[in-house]
Amino acid sequence: MSQPQTGPYDVVDLVIVGAGINGLAIARDAADRGLSVVVVDRGDVGAGTTSTSSRLIHGGLKYLERYDFTLVNESIRERHLLFRTAPHLVHDYPMLIPSYARDSRPGPLVRLGLAAFDVLAARRGRGISRGLSARRIGQRWPQLSRDGLRGGVLFRDAQVPWAERLCVELLLDAERLGARVLTYTTVTGLIVEDGRVLGVRTTDNRSGQQGRIRARLTVNAAGPWIDQILRGQVESRRLNGGTKGSHVILDPFPGAPDTCIFFEAAADQRPIFIFPWAGRYILGSTDLTYDGDLDEVVASDAEIEYLLNETNRIIPQAKLTPADVLYSVAGIRPLPHTAGVSDNAKISRGHTVLDHAPAYAGLLSIIGGKLTTHRALAEDATDAALKVLGRPRGRCTTRTRPLPGADTADWRTFRAEFQRSATPFTGDQRARLLDLYGVRARRVRELVVTDPSLAEVVDEQSGAVAAEIVMAFREERAVTLADVLLRRTLIGLGPDMALSTAVTCADVAVRHLGWDDERARAEVAAYHAELRRFRPRALNLSAATPNSDRRTS
C-alpha cells in the first residue's frame, strides 16, 4: 500500500492516528463536513480494542449507579440512532437481571434504577423493563440457581454481534465522503516544529517506505495507545488508564440460557454477562488494572477460571471447565487515567477531547469512549477540530445518515425481498449475508451472478462463499487473510476460528486474486500466528496433528 507523499504545499486538514471505531467515526464526520482527512493505522481497521468489546450497545444502565446521567442520556440516544442507521447490525437484546439475597445491590434498588432508566429512555427505548418474581424466573429460566433468588427484571438493551462490520462500514462511508484510510502504516513520530504539531511521520509496514503526512491538525485517536503516540515528543500527563477486559467463547452448554443473563459475580460483586452470540455463548467480562504490554494482551488462566466459576455458580448444571472454552478474547478499554481508584468500575466511561494547545498547538487527543457512543464522540471531536481550524461548525448529518449496509429507503422490504429471491443462496446463507452486509449483500450476489464459481462454499459451518473473500479484498480494503477471516467475513470467529478453512480461503485468493502459492502459505502461517492471542482450543488440537497441505508446509 503506497504512502501519500505530501510536501509543504500538500497539507490535509486532519490526520487521524488510529483506525478503530472512534478514529473511523471521526474521519466519517469530518469528511462529511468538508475537511480533507487521512487516517493512519499500523494494522487493520478495528483490529484493536473494537474487536475485543462485549458486542453490546448499552443504553447506559450501569452508569446510573454512578449518577452519570449525562452518559446515560448520551448512550440511550446513540443506541436509538444506531437502531435507525444500522438496523442490519444492531438488534434488540433482552437480558434478565436476577436478584439474589447475597448481592451487594438490593433488588428493590435495581428495580428503582430500571424505573429511572425507563423514564430517561421514554420514546427512545424498545419497551420498558418488567419485574419478575422468583417463581416466574424459575418457570422461564429453570436452569438458574434458586439459592437465594429473590426475583429479577427483564430489561431490553441492544447488541451488535459483528462490531468488526460496524468498523468496515464506517471505513466505506468515510472513503465515500473523501477520506483516505491507510492501514498497515505505522506512525513513527509526530512532526513537531517550534511547539506546533504539523502532522506525522510514517512507515509502510510492507514496503518499508517512509513518508510524511503534513496536516493542519493531528488527532490522536489511538485508544489505549494514545500515550505511546505522544511519548518522547509531547510532554503530557498520563492520559490512558485502560483496564483489561477478557471474555471466553463456548459452544451451547447444559443449561445455557436463550437470553442474556446479567448478574453480579460472587467473587468481586462485578456485573458480568452470559449471553447468546452467533450460535455460541460469550462469558464476560473482567475489569482488571493493566500496566503490561498493550500488544500482548491475552486472557489469563485466572480470568478464564473466574468466568467459568461464576457461570457454574449461577447455572449449576453447566459444569464448565477450561476444556470447554473454544477461545478467549482480551483487550484494553480506552479509559482515562484515574489515580487512586480502588474500584475500576468507578472509572468514567465517557470521553474527552483534549486540546494540547498552547504548549503543542495543532494536536488533539481523544481520551476514553465506548462502542455505543462512537458517533457522539466523533461529533464532539469534529466540532473541536473545526473550532481549532477556524472553520464554520457546519451541520453534522451522522445522526440520520445510514451506514452503507442500511442505505435503502426501506430496510425491512429489502430484507424480505432478498430472503425470498436471492438465488443461488440457501435460506441460512441469505440470513447470514443480510446480517453481515445489509443491502451490500446484493454485491455478493452480483459477484456470483457474474462468476458462478464464486458461489463455492468456503466454510461449511457458516455457509460463507468465495465471493465474500473476493469482495473483502477488492471492495472492503482487506490486506491480509486475517483481515478477511476475522474482520470482514467473520468466518474466523467460528468454533475452530477457521483453522479448518483458512487454506480453502487462501486458495480462493490464488484462483481469483492472483496470489501465488508462496503468498498463500505465508498468509495462512501469519493467520495462525495472529490466532495465538485468542488461545484457541482448535489450534492446540491441530498442533498435535500435522497438516501436510502444500499451503501450510
Image (cartoon, grey):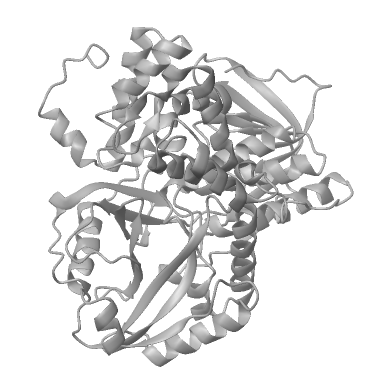
Please state if 546 lies on the left or on the right of 194 as rendered.
left
Residue drawn at (77%, 19%) of the image: 7
Above or below: residue 40 compared with residue 117: above
On the rendered image, what quadrant is the N terminus found in?
A: top right
Please state if 234 lies on the left or on the right of 450 as rendered.
right
On the rendered image, what quadrant is the C terminus found in?
A: top left
Q: Is residue 6 visible?
A: yes
Instruction: Give 305 or 142, whichever is nearer the viewer.
Output: 142
**Residue 215 image-quadrant placement:** top right
Question: Residue reaching furthest left?
Answer: 544
Q: Is residue 226 visible?
A: no
**Residue 465 image-quadrant placement:** top left
Residue drawn at (35%, 16%) of the image: 507
Instruction: Give 149 or 85, whichever is nearer the viewer.
Output: 85
Residue drawn at (44%, 55%) of the image: 55
Above or below: residue 247 compared with residue 30: below
Residue drawn at (40%, 12%) of the image: 510
Q: Position of residue 482 (x, y in %)?
A: 39, 29
Question: How many numbered marks are there?
Answer: 0
Q: Position of residue 183 (x, y in %)?
A: 55, 28
Q: Position of residue 422 (x, y in %)?
A: 50, 36
Q: Position of residue 538 (x, y in %)?
A: 19, 37
Please state if 489 lies on the left or on the right of 395 as rendered.
left
Question: Residue reaching furthest bottom?
Answer: 108
Instruction: Give 395 or 293, whichever is nearer the viewer.
Output: 395
